[in-house]
Image (cartoon, coloured by chain):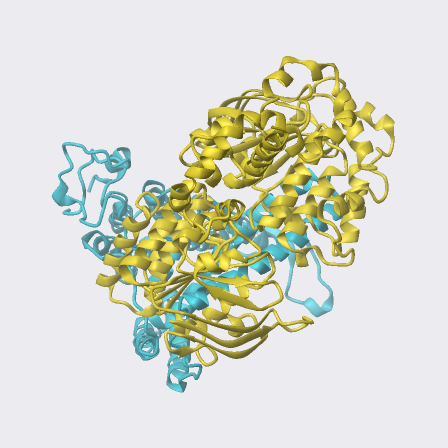
Amino acid sequence: MVAVAPAVGSRSGEPTPGRDSTRRRPTGRDRSVHPLAWWAWALGLAVAVTRTTNPLVIGMLLAATVLVVVVRRDDSPWARAFGAYLVLGVAIIAVRVAFYILVGIKAGGPVLLDLPSIAMPGWATGVELLGPVHLTGLLAAVYGGLRLAALIVCFGAANALANPKRALRCLPASLHHIGTAIVIAVTVTPQLVSSVVRVRRAQRLRGQDDRGLRSVLACALPVLADALDRSLALAASMDSRGYARSQSGRSDARITAALLVSLVAAALGTYGLLDGTSPDWLGLPLLAAGAVIAVGGSVLAGRRVRRTRYRPDPWGLPESLIAACGLAVALLLAGALGMSPDGLDPSLSPLTWPSVPPVALVATLLAAAPAVLRATDPGAVRSGGSR
Amino acid sequence: MIAFEQVGVTYPGQSGPALRDIDVRVEEGELCLVIGPTGAGKSTLLQAACALVPHFTGGLLSGRVLVAGRDTRDHRPRDLADVVGVVGQDPLAGFVTDSAEEELAYGMEQLGLSPGVMRKRVEEVVDLLGLGDLRGRPLADLSGGEQQRVALGAVMTSQPRVLVLDEPTSALDPAAADEVLAAITRLVHDLGVTVLLAEHRLERVVQYADRVISLRGDGTAFDGPPAEVLASSLVVPPIVELGRLAGWDPLPLSVRDARRRAAPLRARLAGSIALVPTAKPGTGPRSAERAPVSAPVGPASSSPAVGATASEPPATAPLGAPALTVRGLHVRHGRVHAVRGVDLDVRAGEIVAVMGRNGAGKSSLLWALQGSGPRSGGSVRLAARGDGVRLAARGDGVRLAARGDGAHLPAGDVDPATLRPSQARRCVALVPQTPSDLLYLDSVHAECEAGDAQGQATTGATRSLLARIAGAVPAGAHPRDLSEGQRLALVLAVQLAAGPPVLLLDEPTRGLDYAAKRRLTQVLAERAAAGVAVVLSSHDVEFVAGCASRVIVLADGDVVADGSTRDVLVASPVFAPQVAKVLHPLELLTVDAVRAALAGDAMAAATR
């Protein structure tokens, strides 16, 4: 693999004899990977996860995702938030299981726990509260929850690895304004927090003790006034620096139509892609058609916005490889599902112990590969670099 | 380049116009300075030049403003973005992105410049303003001065032909301010950029100005060459005041000009300077009358300290017992070691100014002294509230609501960090950098009442303090509608109502005009005379020269100089006030001191 840097490289960037300068990107020592590459990789993993219900395969993919995040994330608040996604994943599984126990359809398989069932009044016939917990149903709930949790973790991984603000900078010119709005909204929150801290600290100087509604009110007024002043100053600053300069004010009907059509196509296409049972034409073809229409509309809209981008993130070999890893994982599992569904969809009736098909092993290694594309941590290289 | 033609601006809900009959032309390549007291309409004039008035602020604009031939009536601010660059008072509020380099590029992205051009200009501006170390860092992590430099850089990358700068150096230390001003003058001289600049601290910029627009305070303005305008202006820098005193014509605007003409004055003063110590007591604000009141500060008032400091210029009261004792103070913010082992003794009646670069640890020091800021090592001891305080309180008509309250405070020396907020404020008061953070009620009257209650002072105490500090402030006014000086006075009154023996002020002069600063100097001198120990941080050397009796210079958290104001300031090339630079080697810091010395000279001549 060309892009695997020697294992001796360290995060601190200190010169080491093993790392020769020709392998390094010319753009500087702290060049980060293009955010869209991470999104492509995470999307590939997400698609792969939806192709299977095998908990072992999902678990392996999940482990690969976590490994890559732990190795490759930086020290930004976004990256630190990854733990929250893991917690959310666990919560999803718990909720799914709780719902099965509470209202799930109890049939088939050995009974694990014989809970009394609570009869519902006439208007809710067919719904049974509690009742015996069957192994099959419970496992189905766990598998389903695990799959959803893995999807969430994939999303979290993309967020942790690619600063959303940087990702927004990759938006086409026509979406620039939306991107700016999101960036400002994201920036305002920490400012508000620091403002609250500052005001509370100042109010303690007045001898105000920290508790009670009074202190909340006393804090809220200066903070809100501050936020208002600041947003006015920001708007003035943006205005006088040329923001929204080229917008003429009238909207183009063609752009609106293109946007609508592509949105619908994207929604249906995503559904088709993620739901393995839907007809073939509903998946990729529709998604592709939606994308083409969206790009067309975007180009059309982008013509009206005259702005350029400063130092866009370059897309190099590592980016291509990372994106390719994600794509390969998705294709491998989708293909494997088509050829031999048994390995990826372990039967629940009769109950069988899930096995790990060889293709899943390959997919996992591919998913974990980005951990060593441009190595950052010597330890991680050894664990993931076996292929 | 900028033409104001019969311009008037009236804001909705205001009785009178903010500006009227402004008829000024600023030619291409001029550096035009806008001066005037607070509230005279400086910001309005600047905003009119970049079309923010009326497109953004609302209000009625009469007459017309032409900028590079474009009429602001039908050009919105964004349509002027390629010819006008604007930097506001608070740099952080104007940032759109979150890293310095992206901020530098933002304006150019909006203008649609090619990536190659953007890259080149960013590098140029980074070199021009010395932003190399900052480029990748998050903007929120930068110090105030660094932020202002980035804000200036972000405007300069668009290479506008007009720069509109509203107090660009108000947050900067003298050295950083000079750096920024040098960059601005380079733009003016080398590239012919037209600059419209508002500034309170004229001593920094007036020498660079080609034209001055002076706002009279009633909405009208007059303009002309700096020397002419300043001869009759309400607000003048110390150097012009000195020139007026010495009768120089035309008035000198730079230290260099003044120095070349000051030889006769220096000779005359050199003869009378021996008389200065005897003339001194009269120059202090009413120190002679107040001395009996504050004399019984304690047995320590006859300590050697008095003898040691008697010759210091503004030391108006005999110094009392130590009010604040600091030993080995360390403050760490995460990885930043902001204060490193500071030892400090502040005596009652002393005004100590803490100076130093942006980020030198001044604010951290003050907050640690107050007790609520972080402290990672060392000790801070406040002397127990003594007689001096009660005397000070009596002087103000303030009575402690219950004398027994003192019993709640631990006897003897206390560490402010161990006190509850309500106790701490009766031992030490801090006015933070943004005083308005303390205000949360909807009228001055309500704030005063709350101040009485929280400070456990008698009803009306805050109100009468406010009247003493700021004169008449409308009781029904909303605190946000007050001028900067009035707001500071209100916070000062609220904080002083509890009669604390130690007063800390963090950058109190930001946004104050000369009149307000003079007022603040008087107020602090009165407090000090009443036995309060005052510690303030400031970048404003002229203010410190006129106000403080002792100066401490911090650098990277260490105390690098500690001595009387005269000793520290005269010797420093950065912190020396203008008068000291002009009259070097005479050790006179302020125009008032020169005036007193001259008066002493005249008196001596009369008696001879």
Q: Position of residue B454 (x, y in %)?
A: 78, 40
- A361 or B533: which is nearer to us? B533
Q: Colour of chain B?
A: yellow
- B342 or B119: which is nearer to us? B342
- B179 or B231: which is nearer to us? B231
Residue B568 shows up from this direction:
yes
Q: Position of residue B70 (x, y in %)?
A: 40, 78
Q: Is residue A298 above or below residue B36?
A: below
- A223 or B529: which is nearer to us? B529
Q: Is residue B206 above or below residue B222?
A: above
On the rendered structure, is A3 left or right of A300? left
Count of numbered circles in the view: 0
Residue visible at 74% across and 34% down in the picture: B422
Query: Which quarter of the picture shows residue A126?
Result: bottom right
Q: Position of residue A188 (x, y in %)?
A: 51, 55
Residue farthest to the front, as pictured: B608
Q: Which chain is cyan?
A: A
Q: Quadrant of the C terminus of chain A?
A: top left
On the rendered structure, is A319 left or right of B86? left
Residue farthest to the bottom, as pictured: A253
Q: Is residue B94 above or below residue B322?
A: below
Q: Position of residue A4 (x, y in %)?
A: 18, 43
